[in-house]
C-alpha cells in the first residue's frame, strides 16, 4: 500500500477512534459495535505496515538505534493496550456480548481495566502521532512516498 493510502487509512482509523472513544457521543451500543469494528481497521493497518515492522526489527537487531527501538517499543505498547481495551470492552459489554447470547462475569474487574486501557491507548496514540509528525509534514509538503523514512534514517 502506498503512503497516500496508508495516510488515509490511518487518518480514518484515528478519527473513528476519537469518536468511538467517547461513548457519550455515540451511546453505549454504537460505542461497542464500532469499537469492535476498529479491530478490522487495526488489522488493515497492521497488514499495511507489516513490511515496515519486519524491516525495522531486522535493522534494529543489525544496527541498534534509540529511534528504531523506541518506535518498536511504542508500537508494541499500542498493540498491547489496544488488545486489552478490546478484550476488556467485550467482556464488559452491554450490547455486543448479549447480542451474541453470552454474559461475562467480573464487571468490577473488566470495567476499570477497560477504562484505564482506553486512556493509556489514547495517550500512546497521541505519542505515536507526535513521533511521526515529521513524516506527516514531509508527506504533506512534498506529497511523495516517504513512508517511514524518518525512522530508518
Image: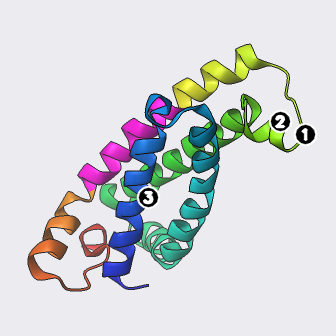
Is the residue marked by circle 3 packed among few (<14), some (14-19), or many (20+) residues within 10 Å?
some
Give the residue pinned by disc 1: 101
Q: Position of residue 102 (x, y in %)?
A: 89, 36
Colouring chosen for the image of the structure: rainbow
Give the residue pinned by disc 2: 98
Q: Residue 13 carries which label?
A: 3
Q: Main structural element of the magenta stretch: helix, strand or loop? A: helix
Pick whichever, 26 or 144, lies toward us. Answer: 26
Residue visible at 74% across and 41% down? 96
Q: Position of residue 95 (x, y in %)?
A: 73, 36
The magenta segment: 118-131
Q: Where is residue 15 in the image (x, y as percent from the top left)?
A: 37, 53
Q: In the image as oriented, which residue stretches furthest toward the top?
A: 108
Q: Residue 144 carries which label?
A: none
Is 42 drawn above or below residue 25 in the view shown? below
Is the residue marked by circle 2 packed among few (<14), some (14-19), or many (20+) residues within 10 Å?
few
Circle nearer the viewer, 2 or 3: 2
Residue visible at 56% across and 74% down? 47
Callout 1 touching callout 2 (CB < 8 Å): yes
Q: Position of residue 123 (x, y in %)?
A: 37, 36
Secondary element under disc 1, as helix, strand or loop, is: loop
Q: Distance between the residues labelled 1 and 2?
A: 5 Å
Residue visible at 56% across and 39% down? 31
Residue visible at 34% across and 51% down? 128
Circle nearer the viewer, 1 or 3: 1
Amino acid at each position: 500500500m502506498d503512503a497516500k493510502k496508508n495516510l488515509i487509512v490511518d487518518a480514518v482509523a484515528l478519527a473513528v477512534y476519537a469518536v468511538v472513544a467517547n461513548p457519550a457521543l455515540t451511546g453505549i451500543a454504537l460505542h461497542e459495535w464500532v469499537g469492535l469494528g476498529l479491530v478490522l481497521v487495526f488489522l488493515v493497518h497492521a497488514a499495511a505496515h507489516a513490511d515496515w515492522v519486519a524491516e525495522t526489527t531486522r535493522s534494529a537487531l543489525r544496527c541498534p538505534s534509540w529511534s528504531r527501538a523506541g518506535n518498536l517499543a511504542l508500537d508494541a505498547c499500542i498493540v498491547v493496550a489496544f488488545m486489552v481495551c478490546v478484550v476488556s470492552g467485550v467482556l464488559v459489554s452491554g450490547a455486543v456480548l448479549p447480542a451474541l447470547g453470552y454474559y461475562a462475569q467480573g464487571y468490577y474487574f473488566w470495567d476499570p481495566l477497560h477504562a484505564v486501557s482506553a486512556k493509556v491507548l489514547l495517550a500512546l496514540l497521541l505519542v505515536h502521532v507526535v513521533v511521526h509528525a515529521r513524516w506527516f509534514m514531509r508527506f504533506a509538503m512534498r506529497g511523495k512516498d516517504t513512508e517511514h523514512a524518518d525512522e530508518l534514517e
